[in-house]
Image (cartoon, rainbow, N blue to C red):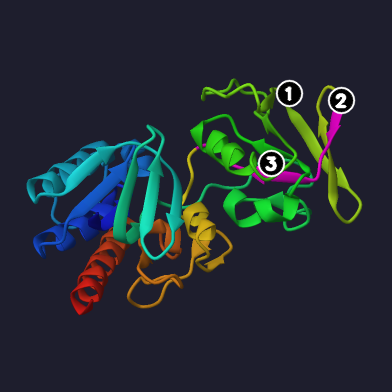
Amino acid sequence: MADVIILGNGPAGISAAAYTARAGLSTVVIGRDGGSLEKADKIENYYGFASPISGKQLVLNGIQQAARLGVKIIDDEVVGIRYDGKFTVQSKNNQEFEGKSVILATGAARKAPKIQGIREFEGKGVSYCAVCDAFFYRGKTVAVLGEGDYALHEAKELLPIVGSVTILTNGKEPKADIPPEIHVVKKEISALKGDNILNTVVFKDGTSITLNGFFVALGVASSGDFAKTIGAETSGNNIVVDENMQTTVPGLYAAGDCTGGILQISKAVCDGTKAGLSVIQQLRKK
């Protein structure tokens, strides 16, 4: 079991890892890519670089720095997290990692899809967390919006509890190996309909399906998704933290863009530093 598992290999996650590793804590960083920072062509407003640096190179420099300090770097996508006194992190490649503490640092939450009715039915049939809300749909018909491994993971979480699960790819080809017990519909979605409660998904070809629940799991799971899964407080798309980057769940921290504020590297590094120092203090007390 690791002392700390950090989700995200960008500035916030790597900054936290540098502190926890140097303090002698066993540290695991799990990340698939550098997110939006990796797409930045030139960075000129960050301290310490006489010449511009690309976001891709800055991400690589950070990962190499962490590895040099003894951090275990895992190149993988996180699809799930559980908490029962300890944290268990599940990856796309069917690996599980246990940790005494976790720092969420995978960047800002993605925007909700532009589908008519999705905002109106949030909490009235539309959900963003299968683990949180599956109980309310026992024996009922539900769908998961998404085409990747995150959508598949959410569908599998629902499968033992609900009556049936359909993955809606919204016009995209599935990127995951979906088992036969999960139905797949590839049509583009036009709107979500219902009276006070969602009951229908209408497709652009004029057809529709009747259901009780609609779970959004687009792309890769965000830090906000993981926070909600284990009951940490969120506000809109942001994770609520205190001055030490501690969430409302003991041992769970968040840092960087996922906590809101200015979306800058310097702020992410500061958040990661505070989160790392907080983890060190917490585990030393124990």
At 74% from the left and 47% from the top, the residue drawn is 118
Q: Amino acid at mark 3?
A: Lys
Magenta segment range?
Answer: 208-219
For mark 2, give the secondary structure. loop
At which x and y percent is residue 38?
32, 38
Spatial distance from mark 2 to mark 1, Cα to Cα?
9 Å
- Which of the 4 quarters of the picture holds residue 161? top right
Residue 158 is left or right of residue 175, and the answer is right
Q: Which residue is mark 3?
A: 114
Q: Is residue 143 above or below residue 286?
A: above
Residue in front for this viewpoint, 21 or 13: 21
Q: Visible in this render: residue 218?
A: no
At which x and y percent is residue 169?
65, 28
- Which of the 4 quarters of the picture holds residue 155? top right
Q: Is residue 82 above or below residue 79?
A: below
Figure quadrant of the N terminus: bottom left
Q: Is residue 98 above or below residue 220?
A: below
Is residue 209 in the magenta section?
Answer: yes
